[in-house]
Image (tube, rainbow, N blue to C red):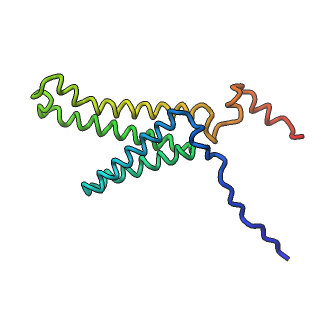
Amino acid sequence: MLLVQPFDLKVSNTVQNPMRQPFTILLTMGFLALYGAYCLWMGYTSSYWAYGVTGIIAFIGSVGLYLNKPWSRFVVYFFAAGIAIVWFYGAWVFFPYGNFSQRPILETAISFLPGFLILTMCVGCSYSVSKHFGTGNSQTSPPHASSGDPNECERLKTEKAP
């Protein structure tokens, strides 16, 4: 007689209560979700598929952070780098045409303010995700990451289980 055990569907214990995560990670999740919703709406109203793809990438990063998955930091890095590249490219393309020299300096500086704010948010989000997953909070951290002793791994390998 063959006994078959049912497949156990346990939810991974890496999913944390989102309110227990650091405030900076909650801000990053919120920023990605809001920007993703904005991009999806702009993609829908303008029928431009690149906005939709950008929104989906932002939502994937936000959900990955919510689930505390280590891969989500690379999505955040990719998203932030993409926004920075597009912003700098746009400024570089419009600069030679004299668009900025035809207006007063104060007006030009104010027109760059939203872009600088978004770039600051991208750098801040990347930094907070880097700190969060780089300090041993991820599920891939080695056992010695908590104590800081590099010889602890070797000691744990040689110890015998009771």
Q: Residue 128 versus residue 107: which sits nearer the camera?
A: 107
Residue 91 in which image quadrant:
top left
Query: Which residue is located at x 42 percent, y 43 percent?
Result: 32
Q: Percent from the top left, x then y, of residue 116?
A: 31, 30
User: Which residue is outermost to the left?
Assistant: 102
Q: Residue at x 12, y 34 (%)?
A: 97
The vertical placement of 88 against 64, above or below, is: above
Q: Quadrant of the N terminus?
A: bottom right
Image location (x, y in percent) of residue 123 = 41, 31
The x and y percentages for residue 96 are 14, 32
The part of the image, by quadrant, that contains residue 122 is top left
Left or right: where 153 falls relative to 141: right
Residue ranking furthest to the front: 19
59 with respect to 113 (left or right) = right
Q: Which residue sits at x=30%, y=53%?
A: 43
Q: Nearer the viewer, residue 55 or 4?
A: 55
Front-lying residue, 84 or 19: 19
Please indicate whether residue 151 sits to the left or right of residue 52 in the image: right
Q: Position of residue 77 (x, y in %)?
A: 44, 38
Hey, which quadrant is residue 92 in on the image?
A: top left
Tell me which residue sits at (57%, 42%) in the image: 18
Say if 159 sits above or below 42 in the image: above
Q: Residue at the top extreme?
A: 105
Q: Name the foreground residue: 7 vs 42.
A: 42
* Quadrant position of the C terminus in the picture: top right
